[in-house]
Amino acid sequence: MRRALLALVCCLHAPAWAADSLIDAVSADWLKRVADAPRRLGYEGTFVFQQGDTMQTMRIANRPDGSGKESRLASVDGAPREVRCNRTESISISGQGGQAKLERRLNTRHFPDLLPANAERLLAWYSLKIGDITRVAGLECRQLELIPKDRFRWGYVLCAEKDSSLPLKATMVNEQGQPLMRYAFTEVRFGGGALPPAVKPAAGVPDMPVSATGDSLQIKQLPPGFVREVAVRRKLPQHGEIEHWVFSDGLTHISLFIEPAAKPLAPVKGESKQGMVNMLVRQIGDRRVTVLGEAPWPAVEAIAMGLEAKPR
């Protein structure tokens, strides 16, 4: 009896860090399971994507492929569009008839594959709140809320299927909790196969952008948690060859485009109607720099104003 009471007293007086460690371990386990589910499961279904006044319905099929995945998305409404992804590349196909346009995309992640492989590291910049069981697409799912710890990133509310942890619904929210972007399955079936192509390309797939050295500019300091994940050279219509950098904390992505400045320009600030996409254009030396992303203004501004010309 005495030993039992002593054990109880020890538990009641356990240091606070022990409870914090337990909470962190539970949160890390949840994030790992939600991040792994879209890569290890075969599934097919239909989901709705909404951003502002725009809504689109997509069919998706996904199957595991060794250490990665192979997935295909095709639009159900609007202009024909298809995205094909595997572990190393993503190809977007759009257009009608024989005029299909092909583009290699830098990011191979898409709903429901939203979290990075090492999702536990997000806990340095987000808190995880585990919510109640609800229903999406006729399936029970657990609501999970990723709450930013600072002003440099938006939050997310996910609903992970009770047994598989596959995200059935995801909402990007601003600092007031207002929705900025939504994804939600309307139906999903596990063990799905391949989805037939919705668009037949008329030409071969263009080459992947080549790596860039970033020899013209450097960045003094990034917002906490952000790293440069991509630096490539690519060609854009009406712009010619540019440098494209991508910064990310694993969940939020911000792009930076560098091109020659044809004439002196004053800084230009812009944002989307809903305030989800922010942009800043400025000139550094003889370069025009455009920074934009689905991120809060402080993050976009910090990256843009942290740039400087490299000494020559």
Image (cartoon, helix red, strand yellow):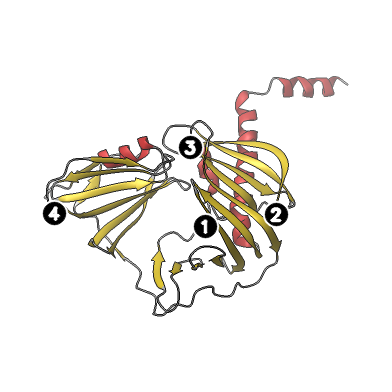
Mark 2–mark 1 CB contact (< 8 Å): no
Q: Earlier in the sequence, mark 2 or mark 3?
A: 3
Q: Which mark is residue 110?
A: 1
Q: Secondary structure at mark 4?
A: loop
The earlier-in-sequence mark between 3 and 4 is 3
Q: CA distance from mark 3 to mark 4?
A: 39 Å
Q: Position of residue 134 (x, y in %)?
A: 72, 42
**Mark 3, mark 1: which one is toward the viewer?**
1
Q: Earlier in the sequence, mark 3 or mark 1?
A: 1
Mark whose residue sits in front, 4 or 1? 4
| Mark 2 or mark 1: whose residue is earlier in sequence | 1
Q: Is residue 115 above or below residue 175?
A: below
CA gap, disc 2 to disc 3? 25 Å
Q: Which residue is mark 2?
A: 164
Residue marked by disc 4: 262
Q: Observer-nearest residue: 53 or 40? A: 53
- Compare marks 4 and 1 and give the one earlier in the sequence: 1
Name the residue beneath numbered marker 3.
125
Q: How many marks?
A: 4
